[in-house]
Image: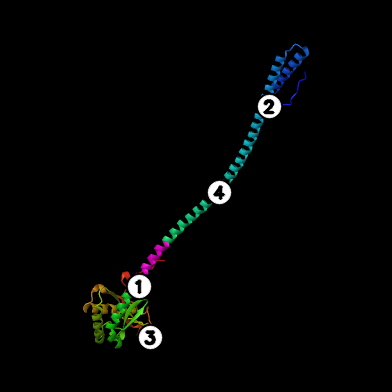
Amino acid sequence: MNIVRREASPMPAARRRRVLAGALLLGALSTSGCVSSARYDDAVQRIEKDVGRIRALNARMAACAQELGDTRRDAAGKTRSLQEALDQETAAGAQLRARLEELGQDVDKLLVDKGTLAVSLQLTKARLEALRRAQAASDARAALYRDLAKKLKRMIDAGELNVVLREGRMVIVLPNDVLFDSGQVDIKPAGRDSLKRLAAALKTIDGRRFQVAGHTDTVPIHTSRFPSNWELSTGRAVEVTRFMLAEGLRPDMLSAAGYGEFDPVSGNDSADGRARNRRIEMTLVPAIDEMVAVPE
């Protein structure tokens, strides 16, 4: 009897040894002529069953290998996808951090700018308020000047006095020749009449102060009563102040000062210039609320 050999897929070594042993046993039995046909067929069937199981096992192993390969390729693909996603998220996170830092710097700068603007706004408001007060004070002074000039118009037209603005102050100028003789402090009758009319006008001004100041030319004086023009100018200012007080002006409205020849309004090299320098001035003293300092 010939034994038909069938090709099979590679099998494990232990299984191959078992099949080989079975084949040798069949060969030995067949050559010895001692094996029955039934036993032989039974042995062949067992071998065929083992070969079938081996083939099934090999098929399952191949399928598992294929599945494992697919799984590995799928895992590798997923790993690459995850890595790419991670890289993208990392880049996006870096960009976000950079933007946040930039925004943080912008916010800090805005806060600083806001504080600076707030200070500037506050200073601007303070300047504006000071300017408003200064404008209101200026308007009040202008109204007072117009009113007083209107009341003194007759005296101005008659040449008894003059009203001027000097360094933002209203000054009433009375020539000495109307009030005093040369080197004297006694007020002349014509001067008394002028001062009476002036006092009547000043009494209508409430809450204002005037400084009465005496001025001379550069011609020196040397007498026992007036050693210099300081004493002469001061004595004349005090005399006018006393007269105005006697005419009803309040003492807190007036003060007296003497400047001698040291505050001229003209040159002393001519008779007309010296005459203009010999004068009594009544300067309107600014009120405290009019002395507004605009913030820097």
**Residue 211 in the image: x percent, y percent?**
30, 75
Question: Which is closer to the viewer, label 1 or label 3?
Answer: 1
Q: Residues within 10 Å of mark 4 (few under 14, many from 20)?
A: few
Q: CA distance from mark 1 to mark 3?
A: 36 Å
- First-in-chain label (1 vs 2): 2
Q: Which mark is residue 135?
A: 1
Q: Find the magenta span and give its range.
A: 119-138
Disc 4 from disc 2: Cα separation: 55 Å
Instruction: Name the foreground residue: 214 vs 253.
Output: 253
Farthest residue toward the front? 37
Foreground: 226 or 155? 155
Q: Is residue 172 above or below residue 71?
A: below
**129 versus 183 height, above or below:** above
Quadrant that contains the N terminus: top right
Residue 37 at x, y = what percent? Answer: 72, 15
* SS assignment at label 4: helix
What residue is shown with label 2? Answer: 55
Whole-angstrom CA distance, mark 2 to mark 3, is 144 Å
Amino acid at circle 2: Arg
For disc 4, the marked residue is 92
Q: Residues within 10 Å of mark 2 (few under 14, many from 20)?
A: some
Residues under labels 1 and 2: Cα distance? 115 Å
Residue picked out by circle 3: 273
Chief secondary structure of the magenta portion: helix
Residue type, label 3: Gly
Q: In the structure shown, which secondary structural element does the residue marked by tag 2 occupy?
A: helix
